[in-house]
Image (cartoon, rainbow, N blue to C red):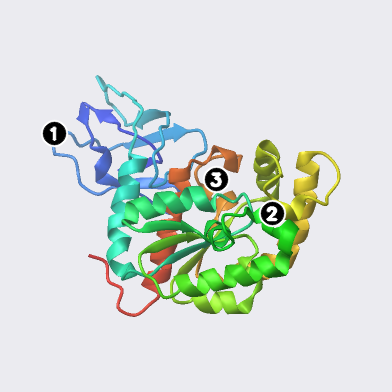
Amino acid sequence: MEASVGHLQHLSSRIDFGTFVRKPSGSVRFLQPISDQQKLPGLVSAFQQPLRLSNRCRTVSVETSCYRENISGLTLETENVRPFDKDLLLKNKSQEVQPHLNGRCIYLVGMMGSGKTTIGKILAKELSYTFSDSDTLVEQEVGGTSVAEIFKLHGEVFFRDKETEVLRKLSSMHGFVISTGGGIVVRPINWKYMQNGISIWLDVPLEALAKRIAAVGTDSRPLLHHESGNAYTKAFRRLSVLLEERGDAYANANAKVCLGGLAAELGFSDVCNLTPADIAIEALVQIQHFLEQEDGYSKS
């Protein structure tokens, strides 16, 4: 008996949602047979609007139908199902990954506005790590001066030197999730320091980045100060140039979370519909994939 992606079907009695798995074609096959009293030599199918069944929390509606010759008195019902809870999935995935990290630091890299701080704090909490922000550490090194003021008073080269020094100190530590500055990837020496941990690139479409930055303003973004136009146009133009310069460097990361692809997998047309939990879960999945390629990793 097979059913396409979806739901509980009631064939006189309920079929447990947990007894089937998704097939590559998008359909699902029941793993456990129904009792003899419940068996029907027909085909039960469920139809829904296009949606990928994922291991994340989704609620969907379907229509079911049953085909069988010479059958009467058959009752079919449908209902909405919430197969997984995001917070629980995040907790479980963190517990699965954490023992294999062996205390190694996690470095989040990506363009300004990509959500490194937000996702970093979630990962740190779930993994029982300490969160740190490289820009904040640089500011502390310069007596509390903001990044924008450091650029204005001392120039970008001075800032990058301080950034590298901060990263050198962090490279000898354990149990940290570090949100890095968007330009930290341009110096090869910085990658040498990050190799002591695991780096993950949060890859966000430029349109979404520009919208985020325009919404909060560009005052804290020194590399955007010299662009003309409205906030969105200014951000998009400069981000396009920066991504062209840094794209290959970001690709050096051990793992990558592509928000555009993740949104499509979850049935969203816009990455803005993704929640921080969605992104954090995917980050853990990608970290796990990286760890699985290393010697000594075994699932418990």
- Residue 196 visible (yes or no): yes
User: Which element carries disc 2, helix, strand or loop?
Assistant: helix
Q: On the image, numbered disc 2 is attached to which residue? A: 149
Q: Amino acid at mark 1?
A: Gln
Tell me: 122 left or right of 73: right
Q: Give the residue displayed 64% in from the left and 57% down from the top.
A: 111
Callout 3 amino acid? Ala
Between 220 and 70, the one lying in front of the other is: 220
Q: What is the x, y in percent for residue 237? A: 80, 51
Picture disc at residue 263? 3
Residue type beneath disc 2: Glu
Q: Which residue is at the far front? A: 143
- Report the residue marked by disc 1: 37
Image position of 15 with respect to 108: above or below: above
Is 189 on the left or on the right of 158, as rendered? Answer: left
Q: In the rendering, at what x and y percent does residue 135 appear?
A: 57, 58
Relative depth, front residue between 279 and 219: 219
Residue contact between numbered discs 3 and 2, judged by CB atoms under 8 Å: no
| Residue plotted at (33% across, 39% down) | 85
Q: Which quarter of the figure has residue 177?
A: bottom left
Residue 56, compared with residue 244, is above or below; it is above
Chain-order first, disc 2 or disc 1: 1
Q: Residues within 10 Å of mark 3 (few under 14, many from 20)?
A: some
* Residue depth check, mark 3 versus mark 2: number of the one nearer the observer: 2
Instruction: Name the residue at 44% across, 76% down.
Output: 196
Work out whether residue 2 can be spotted.
no
